[in-house]
Image: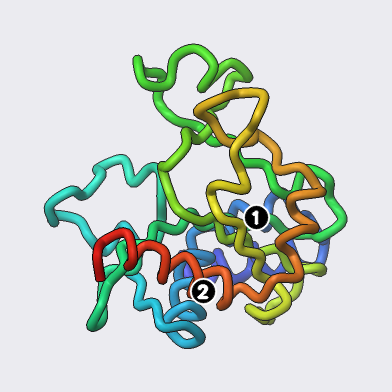
């Protein structure tokens, strides 16, 4: 019953072009889409964080990152934050804030807007799925934008990433092939591990 209801809701959201609500329904599936695309089009072999339950270092809150290059002959441990932001023309399409528990770690500047900002070095790259139109097809070459974590650092808030990625940063990375960004970051990680 749920499968049918979810498909029906998704189809209706595509018809009404409700980008906010379709994003909610697609976010979980987005991790699977990105994982499959990365594993097929790059040398990375990633797992979803939810696949790692019960392993050492597993974060029970599954915060900070969603995908990790942890398989294959030479895993780099590159951490990827997976985001779905439908509609290319929306100025807030690349918002980065999230809802997390209020805690000592998330106090002060981290949560001054009522949501929690990512801190530096929680992940290595943000991978945004942002289709131009809400359609059932997925094209990784057109729909994905990879932005390294260092490009997301907010100079006005040391230690934190942007709450909303400036369009100048989005434009800078939108035309760089995703596989190239991921492969370059993977090589950097491997060099850092002494590989």
Furthest toward the bottom, the residue is 40
* Location of residue 141 (image quadrant): bottom right
Relative to 175, residue 97 above or below: above
Q: Residue at x 65, y 55 (%)?
A: 23
Instruction: Give the left or right position of residue 118, taking residue 152 as reference.
Output: left
* Location of residue 74 (image quadrant): bottom left
Q: Nearer the viewer, residue 33 or 166?
A: 166
**Residue 121 point in image, percent of width and height:** 42, 42
Relative to 42, residue 153 above or below: above
Say which element carries label 1.
helix
Task: Provide the residue designation for mark 1.
Answer: 23
Q: Residue at x 40, y 25 (%)?
A: 101
The quadrant in which the N terminus is found is bottom left
Q: Of the two numbered discs 1 and 2 on the same chain, state the one appearing first in sequence.
A: 1
Task: Provide the residue designation for mark 2.
Answer: 33
Nearer to us: label 1 or label 2? 2
**Residue 172 point in image, percent of width and height:** 76, 58
């Amino acid at each position: 019953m749920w499968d049918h209801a979810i498909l029906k809701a998704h189809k209706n959201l595509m018809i009404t072009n409700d980008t906010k609500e379709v994003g909610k329904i697609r976010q979980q599936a987005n991790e699977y889409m990105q994982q499959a695309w990365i594993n097929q089009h790059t040398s990375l072999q990633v797992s979803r964080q939810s696949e790692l339950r019960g392993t050492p270092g597993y974060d029970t809150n599954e915060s900070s990152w969603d995908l990790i290059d942890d398989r294959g002959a030479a895993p780099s441990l590159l951490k990827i934050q997976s985001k779905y932001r439908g509609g290319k023309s929306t100025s807030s399409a690349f918002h980065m804030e999230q809802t997390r528990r209020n805690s000592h770690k998330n106090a002060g500047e981290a949560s001054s807007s009522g949501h929690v900002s990512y801190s530096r070095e929680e992940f290595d790259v943000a991978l945004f799925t942002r289709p131009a139109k809400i359609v059932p097809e997925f094209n990784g070459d057109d729909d994905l934008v990879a932005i390294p974590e260092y490009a997301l650092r907010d100079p006005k808030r040391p230690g934190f990433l942007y709450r909303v990625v400036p369009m100048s940063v989005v434009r800078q990375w939108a035309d760089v092939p995703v596989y190239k960004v991921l492969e370059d970051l993977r090589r950097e990680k491997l060099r850092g591990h002494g590989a």
